[in-house]
Amino acid sequence: MCGCLHREVFTGATLSPAEGKKKVPASEEAGYSTARCVAFAVARVFRPGDFTAMQSRGDRLMKSIVVVGAQWGDEGKGKVVDYLAGSFDYIARCAGGHNAGHTVIYDGNRFVLQLIPCGILRPGKHAVIGSGVVVDPVALAAELDTLAKSGIDVTGRLHLSNRAHLIFPYHRQMEKAAEAARGAWKIGTTSRGIGPAYEDKMARHGIRVGDLLNPARFREKLERVIAEKDAVCRATYGVPLDTAGMAEQYLELGERLRPLISDVSVLINHALDAGRSVLFEGAQGTMLDIDFGTYPYVTSSNAISGGVCTGLGVGPTRIDAVAGVTKAYTTRVGSGPFPTEMPDLEATEVRDRGKEYGAVTGRPRRCGWLDLVVLQYAIRINGISSLVVTKLDVFDTQKEIQVCIGYHYKGTPLREMPAAAEDLAEVTPEYATLPGWQSVTYGVQDAAKLPRLAVAYLKFISDFLGVEVGMISTGPDRDATIVCAATQLATWI
Ligand code: IMP
C-alpha cells in the first residue's frame, strides 16, 4: 500500500499549505525546511525494484533483517517482530537484558517477553539469545515457566549463547546504591542490574553463561569476584554484599539451562549458509544506545543495528536490511533530554490513550510529539531502509498533530543531533502542524481504509525522511497491522 502512499504524495493526499502549517517559521538556513527536505526525500524515496542487488545475492532472496528501535525504546518492536517472525526461521536477540519488555498480544493472550525473543511464540521457529545480552538466569527461568504454563514448548528451539554475561543479585544491589548516590543526576534505570553487569564485562571480571557448565571453575571465579565486590561495596556504599546461597542457586539454574547453551554465532552463521532466514530483534532504542544515545541517560549496551554484529558474532556483510520502528509520536522512560516532550495535560491524554506505562517497571512514560530529527539520526546510525509506524490509532481523536522538523540551539538551526545531552536539553524544536484525521484507524488492516489525513501524516514522515513506510500498526493485536504493498518490507513476508 505504501507504493500508493508514495504516489499520493504528489496527488490527493498531499497536505494543502493551510493544512500543513508551520508553528515556528523555518529559517532559510535551517537545513530542515520542509521544501528542501521533501526535495531531498523525493530523490531518495523507495521505488519498487531498487533493491534488486539484495534479491539477487546468492541467487536467492536473502533474508537477514534487523528490527531496531528508532526512538527511546518501547516503540512496539515486540509486536512487529512477532508479526514478521512468521516469515523467518530464526529470531535472534543481540543486546540488553530483562530491562526490555516486548509485549505481544494474540488470540486474546498477552505475553510480555523480557529476555526470550518474541519468535518463540511462533511454532517451529528458533529463538536465539546472543553473547551481547546480559542474562539473569532467575529471570530467564521465570520466563521459561510462564511459557510452559501457556503450553509453549521451547525444546530444541531456544538457544542461549555460552558467551553471554550473567547478571547476579549483587549487580542489582550495586545499581540501587549507585542510583541513590547520584541523587538528582540519577539515570532512572530499570533496577535490573543491567549496567553493573556490563561494567563487569568491560572491566574483564564478568562471569559468563558457559561458566555455569563447569561448577569448579564457576565457584572459583565467583569467589574471586565476590571478595572484590564486597570490599568495593563496603567502602563505597557502606553495605556488605549478600551472597548467601548464590553459587548453589546459579549452578542449579545452569543445569536447567544446559540444553539451551551453545555457540550461537556458529548456529546463526550455519543457518545463513544453509539459506535460512534470520530476523534480528533489537532491544531498547537508538537514543538509548551507549555510544549514540543521549549519554549518560542511556542503557549500557549497543541498541543500534551494529549491535547485531558484536552481540551475535554475525558479520556486517551478512545483514541485508534494517527496519526502524517508531511510534506515531514519541515516548521515553527514565531521565534525560526529550525535546518534543508534551506539557502535562497533553502528555496525560496521549499516555492514557496509548497505555504508556512501562511493560517491565509499570512506570508512566513521558510522552511527546514525533521528532523527525531523532528519526533522521536513527536512519543514519542504523542504516534504516524501511520504517514501521506503530500506534497510529492513538492519534485518532487528535485535532491537530505537531511534528518536529528541526532544532534550534541558541537561535541557530542545528544540522545534526548534538552529542551532549546538556545541549539537546536546550534545543528548541521547530514544528510543522498537521491536521488530525479524527476518525477511527484502530484495528484497520487495509491501507485503503485509512482516512486521507492519516495517509497524509504517514506520507509527510516518509517524504521528509526519504525512507519508505513499510508497515503500520493500528492496535496491539497481531492482526491490527498493515503491510504496505510494493515496499521493501513487503518482500520479507
Ligand atoms: P537500564 O537499561 O536499566 O540501565 O536503564 C537505563 C535507561 O534505559 C533508563 O532510562 C531506562 O528507563 C531505559 N530503558 C532500559 N530498557 C528500556 C526499554 O526496554 N524501554 C525503554 N526504556 C528502557
Image (spheres, rainbow, N blue to C red):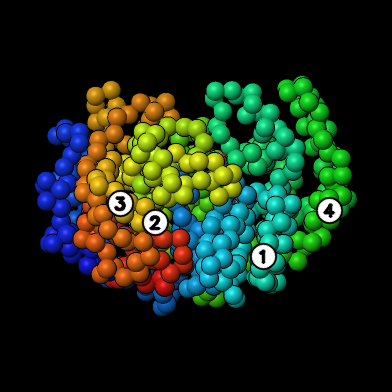
Label 1 to label 2, Cα distance in Å? 26 Å
Question: Mark 1 sits on what residue?
Answer: 147
Which mark, residue 397?
3
Q: Is residue 238 visible?
A: yes
* Residue 82, horizontal then vertical, whole percent: 50, 65
**Circle 4 — which element?**
helix
Q: Is residue 382 visible?
A: no
Q: Quadrant of residue 294?
A: top left
10 Å crowding of disc 3: few (<14), some (14-19), many (20+):
some
Amino acid type for the residue under numbered disc 4: Leu
Q: Mark 2 and mark 4 in contact? Answer it, CB < 8 Å.
A: no
Which mark, residue 390?
2
Mark in the foreground, 2 or 4: 2
Question: Mark 4 sits on what residue?
Answer: 251
In the image, what residue occupies the spot 53% across and 70% down?
Answer: 107
Q: Earlier in the sequence, mark 4 or mark 1?
A: 1
**Circle 2 — which element?**
strand
* Residue 187, horizontal then vertical, whole percent: 55, 32
**In the picture shown, does residue 202 fall above or below 65?**
above
Q: Earlier in the sequence, mark 3 or mark 1?
A: 1
